Image (cartoon, rainbow, N blue to C red):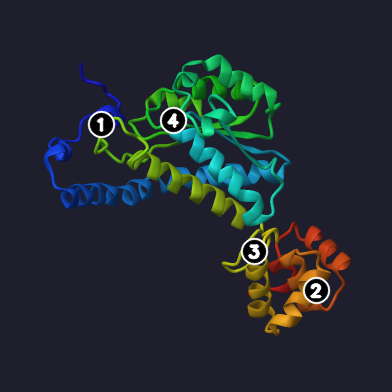
Amino acid sequence: MHDPRLTEQRNPRSRRIDRLSTLEIVDLINAEDRMVAEAVGEERQAIATAIDIVVDCIRRGGRLFYVGAGTSGRLGVLDATEMPPTYGTDPEWVQGIIAGGHPALWRAQEGAEDHPEDGAAAIDERNVGRADFALGIATSGTTPFVHGALGRARERGARTGLLLCTYPTRELYETHDVVIAPLVGPEVITGSTRMKAGTATKMVLNTISTASMVKLGKVYGNLMVDLQVTCQKLRDRGERILVETLGIERGAAVELLERAGGHVKTAIVMGKLGVRAEEARHMLDEAGGVIARVVGDL
C-alpha cells in the first residue's frame, strides 16, 4: 500500500544499491546528500520566522524546547546541549525533550514515540507557558509523542512549530505558528530518516540556534565572545579573540581574561574602554548584552 509520507517512499535511484560496488554506494549517497542544502534553503522564510519567535521568547524570559523521538530527539538534545559552552547561555534557555528520556540518548527506545500522553507530561514537567516556544521535530510528520507535546504546549499558551521532511497538511499550518518542511526526498534506504532527513534537521536546528544567538548579542562580528572558558581549548580561543579584537600580546590577553573572570565579552569591554570588570558587566547589561552597542562595530 502506498504511503503518502515522503520519508517512507522508495527512492528509484537506489533500488539496486545492494548490487553496487563500494565506491558506487559512496557516490550514490553523496549525490543524494547534495540535495539537502537546497531543500533547506527552500524553507528560508519559515526558518527566519522560527528564529524571530525564539529571539522574542528568550527576550521575554521564555525558553526554546526541541521535542522529538529517536534521531530527531537526539539532534534536538545535541543542539540544546551545545548552547551553554558555545554562547554562555543559561541551560534553561534551550532544552531538548526526547521520547524515552535520557536512556533514549544512547539506546533506541522506539516504542516511546507512540505515546502522546508522555509528550504532554514532558511539557507539564517543564512548566511550559506563554513566554515559551516548543518546536517539534518529526521527519515523518506523524510522531504521536511530538504531537502530544505540542498540543499540550498550545493549551498552556506557548507558541509552537513543527519541523518535518514530508508534505505538510493544511491543518499543520493552521495549528502552528511556523511549519518548516525541507523536502529532501526519499532516503537511499527506504525510511532511514537518520540520513538525508537527519542531515536536514541538523542544518535547520543549527541555523535557528546560531542566528538566534547572533541576534541576542552572543556574537561580535563572527566571534563567539560569550563562550564559557571551561577547558583549555576554549581558553585558547578566548585568548586569541582578545589578541585579535584588542591588538594586544598573548600575555596581556591571559591577564585580562583572568581579571574578567574568564568572560571574553567582559574582557573586550574592559580592554576597549579601560574599565573594571564590574563596570564592563554593568555596561553590557544596560546594552542588552549586545557588545557592539558598548564598544562599536568590530
- Report x, y in % for residue 181: 39, 37
Q: Secondary structure at mark 2?
A: helix
Q: Are marks 4 and 2 in contact (CB under 8 Å)?
A: no
Q: Which residue is mark 4?
A: 138
Q: Relative to 226, is 109 above or below? A: above
At a point 16% along the width and 50% down the height, the residue shown is 24
Secondary structure under tag 1 reads loop
Q: Which residue is mark 3?
A: 234
The amino acid at mark 4 is Ala
**Residue carrying label 1:** 190
Do callouts 3 and 2 mark residues in contact (Cβ within 8 Å)?
A: no
Local secondary structure at mark 4: loop
Could you tell me how far apart the alpha carbons at marks 2 and 1 are, in whole angstroms? 56 Å
Mark 3 or mark 4, which is nearer to you?
3
Give x and y (percent) for residue 228.
70, 58
Three-letter amino acid code of the residue under disc 1 = Thr
